[in-house]
Image (cartoon, rainbow, N blue to C red):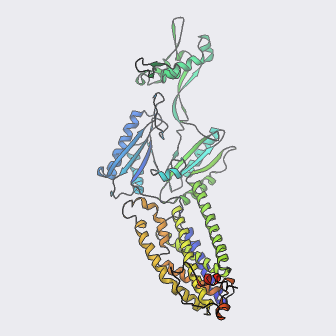
Amino acid sequence: MKRRRIVVLSYLVISGAIIALVGNSLGTEIFPIVDSGQFQLHLRAPAGTRIERTEQIALQALDAIKREVGPDNVEISLGFVGTQPPNYPINTIYLWSSGSEEAVLQVQLKPGAGIGIEDLKERLRHKLPQELPGVRFSFEPSDIVSRVMSFGAPTPIEVAVSGPNLADSRQYADKLKAKLAQVPALRDLAFEQELDYPTVKVTVDRERAGVLGVTTGDVANSLVAGTSSSRYTAPNYWADPKTGIGYQVQVEIPERKINSIEDVKNLPIARRSDQQIDLRNVAAVTDGTALGEYDRYNMQRMLTLSANISGEDLGRAAAQVQQAVSDTGKPPAGVNVKLRGQVEPMMEMFGGLRLGLLIAVGVILLMLTANFQSFRLSLAVGLTIPAVIAGVVVMLWLTRTTLNIQSFMGAIMAIGVAVANAILLVTFAERSRVAGREPWEAAIEGARSRLRPILMTSFAMLAGMVPMALGLGEGGAGSDRRSPRRNVRHARHPAGDPGHAAVAACSDFCLARSSRPAEPLFRVRAAARAGAVPWRPNRRIPGGGGGVSEQSEWMSKGEVL
């Protein structure tokens, strides 16, 4: 009995050591990275750049991308430059851009181009700033899964700084950005908002305006109509008498005629005593800057820092970002810092999966205890689970695969199949032990009788999973997302199943006390000796042992004590 305990404890220690050492070296993320042959590039020209210039920059960026990958390797490209002006009186699409200085480019490479998207991104990060100085570039997720998992964030890493005082939030955000710039795994680090957007500041001299009989409303209406459109101050509609369709009529000053502060100063405000009053007569017009856009969360203004990840998994990168936030120091009073993007859903997902796995293992043990009416037998079956988990983490480590939702699902499936095989093996081994054999003989007999059907099932499953794991055939690129799950399942097929069978057999042998049964479910020996029920230890059950057994047959005859 002492040797048996040593064997069981040694097995548990070795399995636990493998899980702890190898498992801690695995990366974590929500979904595995998929090379779909496409990417999305968000470029930002200097603040206030006109849309015509932004269009030229976007075309130059596309030309640089084609030179890098080869013009024959680009299948299609799509570009969105600027944003729709408010003067455009029709339904528009939503663009992830805040002004005329921004553009979004989507590029799809031809199948078989042989170009890695992640490597291409790194090369473009070095090449594009050299060809287009002053332009900021950021790669965004192009596949629908990454977009959904980011919950609206443009990148996997997003740090939001919010508070009642925008100046305090910006001061802390600048310090935080300097700390995040020291994290080697982050790329494309930048503020999502334009902090210093060029503006024209108009300061009305109320005393002088009052003397001239001009109100602040007159200044505002004239300024809006002169720099934008009359539709904001005097909406006007004309109905076509033939069709009855209404058209909006608006007056605008051509943009090319207002291209300096002097032109703004010469805007007419009002006429008093047959004299025209210009803006320069009642206000001071100077250059200025302002926040390009205001983002709010819970009614508080928010500044967000976004960054991509390169050469590191999401879990380790998130830990480095959290460390950078801690090193920045305590934020000012009222300022809140929150890590968003894919980090928060990843933490929630792994927490739920771990809890679900623990609950599933506990329920399995309770059900097996009720089925066998023996905690010893249920424990013998449950002892195969550490071996399965150890095989899973080793397979993930060998294939350089991260721990994600796909590989976690594969681990749960592998545990389920291994437990199912262990149940049959332990059942057959216990039947032989009840027949009068020694525990070690019963364990060997159970393993020997179940090894062939287990291997047959394993090879059949292996033949079906290999093409999906390698991404072969139609939809091969799409199967990249499913390959981690297949790699996990391969951790137990076909070599893994005999190992689990051996573990189950050894566990049953080590936990067995003697050849005499001690569980109510197997108290059939007395009836067998009395001749009430014929004992056939070598009887093969139809269907591979998944249905009727001798125990259930005796129970139907009422011979179980």
Q: Quadrant of the N terminus?
A: bottom right
In this view of the protein, which residue sits in the foreground, 498 or 162?
498
- Name the one closer to the observer, 271 or 328: 271
Instruction: Choose top left, top right, bottom left or bottom right for residue 162.
Output: top right
- Residue 189 image position (x, y, % from top left): 51, 49
* 96 w.r.t. 430: above or below: above
User: In which quadrant of the rendered image does the C terminus lie?
Assistant: bottom right
Question: How many numbered discs, if any?
Answer: 0
Would you identify the image quadrant in which residue 468 lies? bottom left
Where residue 66 appears, x then y in whole percent?
Answer: 33, 48
Answer yes or no: is residue 360 visible: yes
In the image, 105: left or right of 321? Answer: left
What's the residue at 47%, 72% (across, down)?
490
526 vs 115, left or right, is right
Which of 380/17 is in front? 380
Residue 118 vs residue 443: left or right? left
Residue 393 seen in the current view: no
The answer to whether residue 175 is above or below residue 414 is above
Image coords of residue 246 (percent x, y): 45, 22
- Seen in the picture, residue 174 relative to 53 is either above or below; the reply is below
Residue at the top extreme of this rendering: 273
Decide: is 527 above or below 316: below
